[in-house]
Every structure is written in structure tokens, then in C-alpha cells.
Image (tube, rainbow, N blue to C red):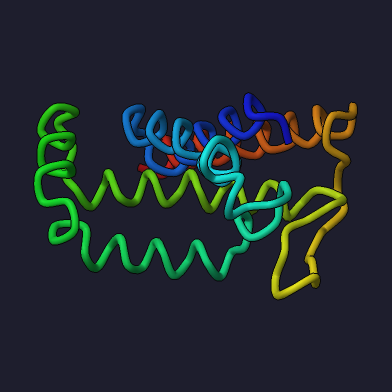
Amino acid sequence: MKWISHQIVAFSMVYSVTGEPLPSLIASASTTLPDVIESGFGKIFFKKHRGLSHNPVLWIILIALLYNYRGKWFPEIPITLSKLLDIDSITLTTAIASGILLHLFADFLSSYGIPLWGERRIAMKLYKTFTFSEFIMVLGILLACSITYGLRRLIL
């Protein structure tokens, strides 16, 4: 999926569930992290696109560690950023984690998929990246998000 598609999907999905623009923007901004870490210095560790940088097991472990140690590893960064954005550290961490996991989910839906273990990949094969099918997939997700948001507003 193109970066803009990842960002639109992440924003829409988080906003449709929370109704909050700030966590949705943070999720949208963080959704490209699995791709961003593959560039620059990251090329040393991540030899190919959608390799280890897209492994859901790795990200789930990293996110669990982030939740557990977010105040201990970087005590000033989350507090300062959360005060600047007027957002608590749990919401900030959840928004970042949501963006990352939504990136992996969107890539899982593609024909190439994501790595599960070693060379084994999992893929739903619902669209092919950089084709019209990706555009249709994004539109379908936006439609589902619109319906979800409408139902959420109706119920709440």
C-alpha cells in the first residue's frame, strides 16, 4: 500500500472508533513506521521491504515493551510530548501502536502479505499494491469506517 493509503486508512479507522482527531492523526503519522525504519541506517538491519520490519510478532513484542516501560525508558519524552499535545501517555502509546498495527493489517490484506516466521508469509490477497485494486480496497475501508462512525454516533 502507498504511504498515503496507509495514512488515510489509519486515520479513518481510529477516528471511526474513537471520534477523536488527535489520536487519529498520531496513528496516521505513525502508520508508516514499519517502512520508515527500513531506510537510512535501518538498511543495515532490514535488507528487504516487508521483511523483518513487517513481522507482527516483533511489533507486538515491541509494543508490549513500550506499554510496560514507556515511563522508565524515556521518562521526559512521553511526558513532554503528552503535555504539548494535551494527551495522556496511554492514549499516545495506543495511537502509535494502532498506526503500526494498522499498517501491518493493511499489508496483510495485500497479495504479497507480511512475514510470519522465517520465509513463511501470510496474505489475504485482496488487492495488489500500486494497482486499481488498492484504490478499491481503500474506498471499501473508508465506506466501512463511515458506516461505523455513523452507527457509533447513533448509539452514543
Instruction: Name the residue located 64 percent from the left edge and 29 percent from the top edge.
Output: 3
Q: Is residue 105 left or right of residue 139?
A: left
The correct choice, above or below, for 89 with respect to 132 in the image is: below
Q: Position of residue 143 (x, y in %)?
A: 68, 32
Q: Is residue 43 left or right of residue 80?
A: right
The correct choice, above or below, for 56 with respect to 7 in the image is: below
Assign the C terminus to one quadrant of the image: top left
Task: Tell me where residue 5 sits by quadrant.
Answer: top right
Assign the N terminus to one quadrant of the image: top right
Q: Position of residue 92 (x, y in %)?
A: 27, 44
The correct choice, above or below, for 8 with respect to 56 in the image is: above
Q: Position of residue 140 (x, y in %)?
A: 74, 35
Number of marks in the image? 0
The correct choice, above or below, for 31 with respect to 59 in the image is: above
Q: Position of residue 73 (x, y in %)?
A: 18, 58
In this orientation, which residue lies closer to the viewer: 13 or 39?
Answer: 39
In this orientation, which residue lies closer to the viewer: 149 or 47?
Answer: 47
In this orientation, which residue lies closer to the viewer: 29 or 149?
Answer: 29
Instruction: Name the residue located 78 percent from the left edge and 66 percent from the top edge.
Output: 122
